[in-house]
Image (cartoon, coloured by chain):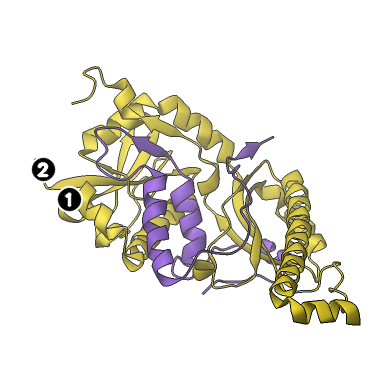
Amino acid sequence: MTHETPRGSALAAEGRLPAERVALVDLLDRLLAGGVVVSGDLVLSIADIDLVRISLRALIMSVREESDAPDQGGRYAPTWK
Amino acid sequence: MTDSGTYVYAVARDAGHARPADLAGVAGTPVHAITHGGLVAYVSTVPLEQFGEEPLRRSLEDLDWVGEMARAHHRVVEAVAERVPTAPVRLATVYSSEEQVRDLLDRWHDDFTEVLSHVSGRREWGVKAYVDPTAAASAPAPAANGGGEGAAETARPGTAYLKRRQASLRNREQRWRQATARAERIHADLSAVAVASRLHRPQDPQLSGRDEWMVLNGAYLVDEGRGEEFAAALDALRGQDVDLELTGPWAPYSFIALEFDRADLEVSGDA
């Protein structure tokens, strides 16, 4: 289940959630769109995020139709100051 | 062909205590460290019958399997990030040998060093904003029709249906515009307290477990000393029209924008 932190002051309380309590969907956001990406012949597996997303999407779509929220448009790169 | 590969979780500065004690990685494999040139990569040896390209492609269709792998990957990243600045590696990155990992640390040493300096002393926080699409926005409800028009409706029920439908869509669009404008303000205010920010795609309701519109799925890299300030900014943004959900602190997953293509650098070109 999604964990909720009702008060921002919970920021002060150090200590991360155990891996088992982190919502999988929040984790996948980060594991599939972030991190060091290596592609090329010597890497055997999936570095291509789109492939993974497509796979998961196929799974989700089989359970439920796609969200009816309008598309936000895409600009999902980090912004640094 | 060899029957095992090297799964890579994260790269960090080698602080001299590289070995995580008894840490289990994906598929229960023990994690070990490869140190090279002041950097350390956390890896485990995985069977290619599970982590080769084809088996992996099939397994990625199975959300339970992906979930287990993701949590195992995350556990390792967390254990490392607790102690040293860490660059997590994309889920499911498998090399053919440990020598290739050393080569990665060697070739990209300066890039890793730079990105690790950017995330040092900083934490990633996640903030999601939800808006209920059925909640009353400032859009007025459709006015009741007068008698004359009512008669016309009876005569042409199809037209009346279309009008109602158009009005309903207009209201929905207006609510959406208001909600996204709100989300942009939230993102701007939180970004002001962060050294870097990033938007993730809104989550599918099937995965988030919530039917409301997710109008913001943001990640914010915040200096450890400014955590309270970030919390205060978040609290100031809470209101009846929006539900804000905080997650974290995370290892800086969303702020490691390093993409290497090995093939570009191979002298021999493609096989």
- Residue at image mark 1: B48
Q: Amino acid at mark 2?
A: Thr
Which kind of residue does numbered mark 1 sit on?
Leu
Q: Which residue is mark 2?
A: B2
| Image quarter of residue A58 | bottom left
Residue B120: x and y in percent read 57, 41
Which percent across, then down, holds residue A30?
49, 52
Q: Chain A colour?
A: purple
Instruction: Sort mark 2 into few (<14), some (14-19) or many (20+) by Cα contacts within 10 Å.
Output: few
Q: Indicate the chain on which mark 1 is placed.
A: B
**In screen coordinates, is B188 left or right of B32?**
right
Residue at point 34%, 35% (across, down) = A39
Front in this rendered view, residue B168 or B132: B168
Subunit that carries the residue with mark 2: B
Please give the name of the residue rendered at 79% of the width and 59% of the height, measured from the top-left corner.
Answer: B178
Q: Which mark is residue A3?
A: none
Estimate the x, y position of residue B20 in percent, counting from the top left.
Answer: 35, 53
Residue B30 seen: no
Kindly indicate which chain is depicted in yellow in the rendered structure: B
